[in-house]
Image: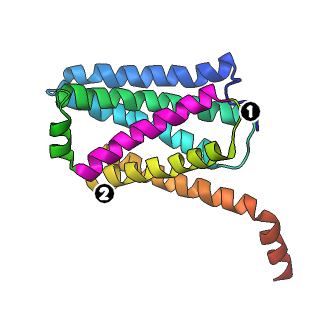
Amino acid sequence: MPELRRTTLTRFTNTFVPFAIVIAAALLAPEAQQSIAHARAAFTIWVTMAFLIASLCLFFIPGESEAQMNYWLLCWTFGFLALVAHFYFTIAVIFRGSLREVYATQGMIIATSNFVDLAWWGSDVLLAWLVAQQARWIKIERTGAHLYIPLTFFISAVVIKHGFVRSLGIAMTALLALSLQIRWYYKHEPSVREHGQTA
């Protein structure tokens, strides 16, 4: 397993510069909107999903090169930072810091799953940056996060929401399914090939 944190300036730049551009656009573009806070909450979740999609593909597609793992960690980190920005505009600004309003508006299941996303994603980012040894429980926890979080985003973006965020949710689901299929194929490639030769 390569060292996750041993990144290079080039890799950092390749991820940070796009992140800085799109997050700045997500914060500045709403100035022309009637409801700035709602627009910023919407735009920052778009940024979150874009980096989440990249993270999922890098995590599940076969290969554990240092470059792939570095790019995964950077995308995973910047996606989380975008989620923090989304939570700020949603919880602190729109709902004025009232958890009662959050739960009354979103409902118990959706609101709780959103907080679980924030806590689990943030915890895994910290583990990835602070813990060098990739213990078995961390691998299980991390795989669980990469399955649970997109599931909640699918429900929120595709089932409940509409518009551009739904398109992002559909793209995320399709690319996650493709990544898992590719991973399965490469894991079973010898048996698949042997079966093809004997058929």
Residue type at the position of mark 2 = Val
Write the residue at 60% across / 23% down: 14
Give the class, few, some or many, for how many residues have Cα within 10 Å of label 1's Cα (few <14, many ≥20): some
Identify the magenta region: 108-131
Helix, strand or loop: magenta stretch: helix
Where disc 1 sits, the SS reads: helix
Q: Image quadrant for the C terminus? A: bottom right
Gap between marks 1 and 2 measured at Cα: 36 Å
Q: Is residue 103 left or right of residue 56?
A: left
Horizontal and vertical percent for residue 37?
21, 26
Write the residue at 34% across / 25% down. 26
Q: Which of 44/96 is in front?
A: 96
Q: Would residue 126 be counted in the magenta stretch?
A: yes
Check disc 2 and report the residue beneath it.
Answer: 159
Residue 49 colored in magenta in the image: no
User: 22 or 159: which is nearer to us?
Assistant: 159
Residue drawn at the location 28% of the way across and 23% of the way down: 29
Which residue in the structure is indicated by mark 1? 66
Task: Residue at 76%, 34% (x, y): give it.
Answer: 2
Q: Is residue 190 left or right of residue 70?
A: right
Q: Is residue 152 visible?
A: yes
Q: How many marks?
A: 2
Query: What amino acid is found at the position of numbered circle 1 in the picture?
Result: Glu
Which secondary structure lies at badge 2?
helix
Q: Say whether marks 1 and 2 touch (CB < 8 Å).
A: no
Furthest toward the top, the residue is 9
Q: Determine if residue 162 is in view.
A: no
Where is residue 156? Give x, y as percent.
32, 50
